[in-house]
Amino acid sequence: MAKRRVLIVGADAAGMSAASQLRRLDRDVEILAFERGSYTSYSACGIPYLVAGLIKDPRRLISRTPEEFASSGIEVRTLSEVVQVDPEARRVTVQHRGGTYQEDYDQLLIATGAKPLRPQVEGIDSPGVFGVNTLDSGIELMRAVEDRRPRRAVIIGGGYIGLEVAEALNCHRGIQVTVVERARTVMGTLDPDMGELVGKALEDVGIQLRAQEALSSVESSGGWVKGVWTDRGFIEADLVVLGLGVVPNSDLAERSRIPLGVRNSIQVDLTMRTAVDGVWAAGDCAQNYHMLTKRPFYVAMGTSANKMGRVAGMNLAGRHQEFQGVLGTAVCKICKYEVGRTGLSEREAAELGLDFVAASAADETRAGYYPGSGDITVKLLALRGSGAIVGGQIVGIEGAAKRIDVIATAIRGGLTAEDLVAMDLSYAPPFSPVWDPVQVAARVLLKHL
Amino acid sequence: MAKRRVLIVGADAAGMSAASQLRRLDRDVEILAFERGSYTSYSACGIPYLVAGLIKDPRRLISRTPEEFASSGIEVRTLSEVVQVDPEARRVTVQHRGGTYQEDYDQLLIATGAKPLRPQVEGIDSPGVFGVNTLDSGIELMRAVEDRRPRRAVIIGGGYIGLEVAEALNCHRGIQVTVVERARTVMGTLDPDMGELVGKALEDVGIQLRAQEALSSVESSGGWVKGVWTDRGFIEADLVVLGLGVVPNSDLAERSRIPLGVRNSIQVDLTMRTAVDGVWAAGDCAQNYHMLTKRPFYVAMGTSANKMGRVAGMNLAGRHQEFQGVLGTAVCKICKYEVGRTGLSEREAAELGLDFVAASAADETRAGYYPGSGDITVKLLALRGSGAIVGGQIVGIEGAAKRIDVIATAIRGGLTAEDLVAMDLSYAPPFSPVWDPVQVAARVLLKHL
C-alpha cells in the first residue's frame, strides 16, 4: 500500500508549522511542500530590522532551510509554483524552471500567504520604489539603502509595516522620512484618538506624517525615483517604500474554484478545512476567526499563521483540533515608542451593535522616580452591562506595548473592568507603578460603567 | 450632630489608600491618621534604588506629604504612635513627644505594616549593620555607602529585598557583594529549580552567593562592622545589610486583644473587618487571601496593601466591596536579570494536595535575530485534570519578568494550558519570538498533561 501523501503549497509560517506538526504526529505520511520563492520559513516580520541594519545577514531571518526540513523527512521544492489544483483528481500542477509537471495528493494544504497592496499609479514600477513583503524585496531595499545612501524617503501607508520601515530608515539609517497616509490617523486598527498619539510620537522622533493625503504618481529622473505626487503636491524622495498592507493571496484557490470568504480569503472552518474535500488552507491566505465574536474575519499575522498551521497539521494527522481564533493582537515599535492593540476597536464594537464604554488613562511605564520611566496611555473597552473587557490599545515608551498581552488574556478569560482593577499584577519600581497602567485605565473605566 | 470620625493607624500604602478612597466617597467624614515615623505614603520598594544612587533625593519616594493630605481634608499626625486601642470605648491612646493623649473614633483602621526580621545574634546592633525597611533606614544606608565608600558588603538573606540591595551595591555602586542565604536556593517563593537559575544569575553578575549558610554573629572593630561569622566561617565586610524579610507588625492589635490569624497577621474578612466591632485592618499587618485557593495566607506587598486599603476605604464609606485576594505575584530586577512569580509554587500546590504537573521551557526574550534578545526560562504549573494554570515562574534577562502578568491573568481567568497555547499574544521581533515564551512553556506543559 502506498504511503498517504500530503502536499503543501507555500513553505512559510503556516505551511511549515503544519508540516512540522504533522511529521511529529505521523512518522509515515509523505510530506511534500512547494515554495514559489527561494526561501523557506523566514520571518517576514524581521525585514524592517534587516533594512535598519540591525541584522547584517539576511540568512538570520530564515528559521529552517529546505535541507533542515529534509533531515526531518519533509521535502521542500523551492522555485516551484503550484498553478492549478484539480480537487476531483486530487492533483496539482507545478511550474518549475519554465516547465510544468503534476503531483497527486491525498490531502492538500494551501498556505500561499498574503500579497501586498500595490497602488496602480503612474511610475509605481520605477527603480527606487520598493515593497517589503518578501525576503528578496527586503534584501533589495537594504542594498539600496547601503549602496545609494538616500537622504529622503517616502513611505506610502502608515500601517504597522510602513511605520516599522519608517523607524528603520529614520532612527537607524538617519534618512529623512515622510509617511503618506490616506486616512486621518495612522494605524487603522487603532481608534483615531490612539492613532493621534502615534502621530505625535512620529513627530517627536522626527518622522514627518502627511495624513489625509493620497499617492497620485511616482516621478523618476535618470532611471531612479525622484519623488512622489500626492493629491496635495510633490514630495522629494530618493527612495519610496510601499507599506499599504496586504490582502489574502487566494489566487490559486480562486482559480481552482475553492470557495472564498471574508475579504477574498479562503473559506475554512475551525479545523482549517475548506469547502472542497481533501483541501485545507491556513495562514494569511485563509479566513480567520475572531476569538471574541466567533465571527469570520481577516487578519494577516505571523502568530496567527503559526497557530492555524499547527491546527491544520494536527487535523491532517487525524486528530481533531479546533482553532480558537485571534483577537487581532499586534504590537509595533517606532524608535523609542511602542504601540499595542487587541480585541475590538470602538468602530468594530459599534459595527457589532455592542453597548460599550471606552476610557483611557495616561500614566507612567515605571515608578515615577525610577530612571527611564515615561509616558504610557492605555485605552480599554468594556461592555456596559457586564463590564467585560472587549478591547484595549496602548501607546507609550519602552515597556508599554507588551502590556497588551494582559488585556488580551483578560478578554480571553472573560474578566471585567472590576476584575482587572483587583488583579494581582506584578510590581517593582523598575517595572511598573504600584497600580499597573492597565489597572489605572480599568479604574477610570469603572467610573464610566 | 457630630461628624462621623474615622481614625487610621499608619499613614502609608494601605492606610492612605483607604483614607483617599473614603474621602472620595464621603466628603463629610472626619479622617485622622497617625504615623509613628516622619514620612507618609512613601515607596518602601524604592529604597534599593535610593541606595543604588539612581534616585538622588529621598523625597522623590514620597508620593504625598501630610500637607498634601491636609489639602484634601485628611489630617495626618506624624511622630505619633498609637500605643493602645480600647474597642469598647472606641478610643485610642497616642504617644507623641514623650506624652500621651486619647482620641475617640467611630471606626478605626489599623494599617501598621510589617516589621523586618532581625536575627538575635551578637553584634547585630553594631554601627555598619543596616536595615532597609523604612525610609530613614534607607537614607542611613545610602549615606554610609556615599560617605564611607565601603568595598565589601554582606547581605543577610536572599529574598527580594536582599537581592535588590545586592543589585544596588554591586551593579550600581561597584561594591563586592556576598549574599548569605540559609536555604539551599535564594528566593524562597520560587521552586528550587528556578531559585537555582537566580543563583546562576547572581554569579554571572559577580554577586557571590553563600547558600545553606547561617549568620552566627557580627564582628566589629573600632566602632564599625568588620565582618560576619556564619556557621561556615568569617566573611569580611565594611557594610552589612539585613534583608531577611518581614513579619506582620500586629503588636498594637495583639496588645489590644484584636484576634490574629495566619502568621500573626490581623484576622480580617474580605471586607477588611477584624473580629472586633468598629475595627478594620489592611495592608502588611493584616491577613491576606489567596485568589486561587480562597484561603487566608500572608504576603507583604505594596500592590496588595494598596488594594486592601482601597477595599477598606470603600467599606468605611458604607459601600460593600470584597477583596479578591492576591496570587503572590512579584517581580525583581537583579542587574541585567529579571525574576517573576505568581500563583502556587510546587511546594504550595503539594501542600494543598493538588494533583498538578509542572513544566518549564528555556527560550528567548525577543526574536532570535533581534539585537538584545536573550535567555528566558518560563515554568508553569497546571492541574492534571482540568489543565487549569495555577502558577508560574520566570527567570530571564530584560523583558522577561513582566510576562508574569499574563500568567497571573490566565490564572485569574481560569485558563488552561491549551488556552494559553491558543492565546493571541502580541508579537513583533523587538518584543518576542512568534510564540511567546509563556506559550512555549504551555506547549511543553501540554505534552505532560
Image (spheres, coloured by chain):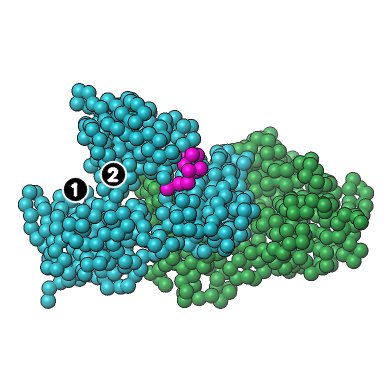
Chain colours: A green, B cyan
Using residue A111 as the reference point, say whether residue B322 is left or right of it. Answer: left
Do discs 2 and 1 belong to a common subunit?
A: yes
Q: Pointer 1: what residue? A: B38
- Relative to B91, residue A101 above or below: above
The question of residue B193 being in magenta is answered with: yes
* Most foreground residue, A421 or A286: A421
Q: Mark 2 and mark 1 in contact? Answer it, CB < 8 Å.
A: no
Determine which residue is flagged by label 2. Answer: B117
Relative side of B281 to A138, left or right: left
- Secondary structure of the residue carrying tag 2 is loop
Q: Is residue B384 magenta?
A: no
- The three-letter amino acid code for the residue at tag 2 is Leu
Residue visible at 23% across and 59% down in the picture:
B110
The magenta stretch is B189-198
In the image, farthest residue toward the top = B222
Residue A405: % across, % down: 53, 56
Task: Name the residue rendered at 58%, 73% in the picture.
Answer: A351
Report the amino acid beneath label 1. Ser
Crowd tier of the residue under label 1, counting other residues whose Cα lies within 10 Å: few below 14, some 14–19, many 20 or above: some
Q: Which mark is residue A330?
A: none
